[in-house]
Amino acid sequence: MGLLTGELLKLPVINAVSHIQRDGDKIIVERTLEEDVEIIELTLPAVLCVTSDINVPRIPSMKAILGAGKKAVTSWLASDIHWTPTTPMAELVAISVPPQTERKHIILDNDSPEAITALADHLKKSLN
């Protein structure tokens, strides 16, 4: 998705970014590949596609967990953020479930040479 976004915006794209550091008006990124780590310096704006190890979330303390339960929740209306609904670009026409197909199965209750031959014959017949 990042490559397409960068192409549409005509911006440079760096994928597999595992670390980002800002240095004035440019950024320095580490790009983790299979066997290498590349360090790339580029100016902004740019599109960065990060890996899952870009952030290790910190575990909140017990005090923070208990304090979060006491905080007030702020509710916003659409008018508070100056949002107006737009006409959808797609419309759901129908939802259907494909018909269930009968599963084909054979249960062999032993591992005798005859049962193994029967299984092999059945598999050959099923694949043809």
Image (cartoon, rainbow, N blue to C red):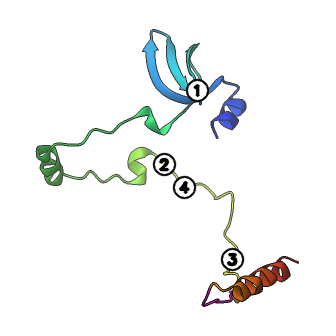
Give the quarter of the image for residue 119. bottom right
Report the mark closest to the observer, 2 or 3.
Answer: 3
Task: Name which of mark 4 and mark 1 comes first in the sequence.
Answer: 1
Q: Which residues are magenta?
A: 103-110
Dot 4 and dot 1 residues touching (CB under 8 Å): no
Disc 2: which residue: 83
Q: Amino acid at mark 2?
A: Trp
Judge the density around disc 3: few (<14), some (14-19), many (≥20) Cα neighbours within 10 Å.
few
Disc 1: which residue: 35
Judge the density around disc 4: few (<14), some (14-19), many (≥20) Cα neighbours within 10 Å.
few
Where disc 2 sits, the SS reads loop
Judge the density around disc 2: few (<14), some (14-19), many (≥20) Cα neighbours within 10 Å.
few
Dot 2 and dot 4 residues touching (CB under 8 Å): yes
Disc 3: which residue: 94
Inspect the magenta stretch and tell me whether residue 105 lies in it. Answer: yes
Q: What is the residue that sits farthest to the top in this orientation?
A: 24
Residue sitting nearer the eye, 116 or 48: 116
Q: Amino acid at mark 1?
A: Glu
Task: Name which of mark 2 and mark 1 comes first in the sequence.
Answer: 1
Residue sitting at 52 percent across and 52 percent down? 84
Give the quarter of the image for residue 41. top right
Task: Name which of mark 3 and mark 1 comes first in the sequence.
Answer: 1
Residue sitting nearer the eye, 114 or 40: 114
Magenta stretch, main secondary structure, is loop
Disc 4: which residue: 85
Q: Amino acid at mark 3?
A: Ala
Task: Name which of mark 4 and mark 3 comes first in the sequence.
Answer: 4
Q: Is residue 99 visible?
A: no
Dot 4 and dot 3 residues touching (CB under 8 Å): no
